[in-house]
Amino acid sequence: MNIPPINLKAQFKLVQKDLLKNIKEILTEQKLILGQYCSRLEDTIAQYVGVPSAISCANGTDALILALMALGIKEGDEVITTPYTFFATASSVVLMGAKPVFVDIDKESMNIDPGLIEGAITPKTKAIIAVHLFGKLCDMDRILAISKKYGIPVVEDIAQSLGSRNDQGMSGSFGDIAALSFYPTKNLGGIGEGGMVLSRRGDLGEKARKLRVHGMGSVSYLHEMVGINSRLDEIKACALVVKFPHLEAWNRKRIENARFYNKKLKDLPVLLPHIGDDLSYIAHQYVIRVQERDRLQEFLKQKGIATGIYYPLPLHLQPCFAYLGYKKGDCPIAEEAALTSLALPIYPELKKTEKDYIVASVKEFFNRTS
Ligand SMILES: Cc1ncc(COP(=O)(O)O)c(C=O)c1O
């Protein structure tokens, strides 16, 4: 068998007819940037997440940059976040001239440990970035309580968590502002790069909307602030509009796959993700932790099963952040996760035979080595 890490061709087949028709129409009309599909996408996602402001942009990294710019993050500021995330969560802080302050993760959720945030707050702390990693909601009750106590705004990085929620709301609706990615492998993935800023605060939404087009408001070539060029193409927005109606079903399928793995792998010497009865984890990635990670990955590769390592080196130990002065042992749980994490294929189109084969192969690895 040959099982890829993701099956984008199957997704394309599902939306192909509508998408190609709409692309032809866009090309005929030649309204190529920030047109009706961008507006529709913004309205659709704003409504889904439950916030008033949604601003499409070029990618998720820009969404983080725009969010931090809207909050006024600048040189000398500190921003607290997790070291166990994709690079852009912290590089966006550095690009603002500010300093990322890393605190360790919680062992079970693999998200920032809220119990460590207060100890990292200084007079320079100007934001907390909460990343809902692998599609699992952070402990927002505790993070928001800290935010309120100290008057520090919260940025949610929802690149991996569109649709995860608890009884108080959707990821992206809790913090002051949120950054979303439509990178093709995300739960709602586009046909190229794409991103969005979301905010429950009208003032921040309005600012981000201007910052996306060089700080211009409604008057052309009148620049109220210095922004960037980070617009979304109509063709890409159109693909997301056409795919969006499938998101909930895809997320449920992913959760179903994750539950299947958890049930079948529970007796093995691996740490499995916690999956509750709710939708707080939408299984963007299904990550197990295993001591012999590299050997298991190689074994599965020989079996034709693609796996991923998210992430092999935590951000506090990245060479480009050496100037921040972190050393090995500063965030031990993140460091352990980096050595033991392995993501199994979890995409919605996985067939039962493929899941059975993956489970059988993982079991075979442990049977051979025990
Ligand atoms: C947690 C997280 N933050 C930010 C990003 C950046 O998004 P993009 O790749 O669209 O710039 C990603 C995407 O990989 C991500 O996973």
Image (spheres, grey):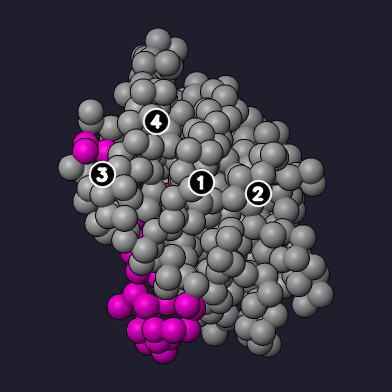
Q: Which amino acid does label 1 sit on?
A: Lys
- Can you tell which of label 1 and label 3 is closer to the viewer? 1
**CA distance for labels 4 and 3:** 13 Å
Q: Kindly tell me whether residue 165 is visible in this rendering.
A: yes
| Residue 313 magenta | yes
Left or right, 199 with reference to 187: right
**CA distance for labels 3 and 2:** 35 Å
In this rendered view, identify the residue nearer to me: 191 or 120.
Answer: 120
In this rendered view, identify the residue nearer to me: 93 or 287.
Answer: 287
Q: Which part of the image, by quadrant, shows the C terminus? A: bottom left
- Can you tell which of label 3 and label 2 is closer to the viewer? 3
Give the residues in magenta. Answer: 303-332
- Can you tell which of label 1 and label 2 is closer to the viewer? 1
**CA distance for labels 1 and 2:** 32 Å
Residue ID for mark 2: 172
Kindly state the secondary structure of the residue where label 2 is placed. Answer: loop
Residue ID for mark 4: 355
Residue positioned 36% across, 63% down in the render:
291
**CA distance for labels 2 and 4:** 31 Å
**Residue 92, above or below 174:** below
Kindly state the secondary structure of the residue where label 1 is placed. Answer: loop
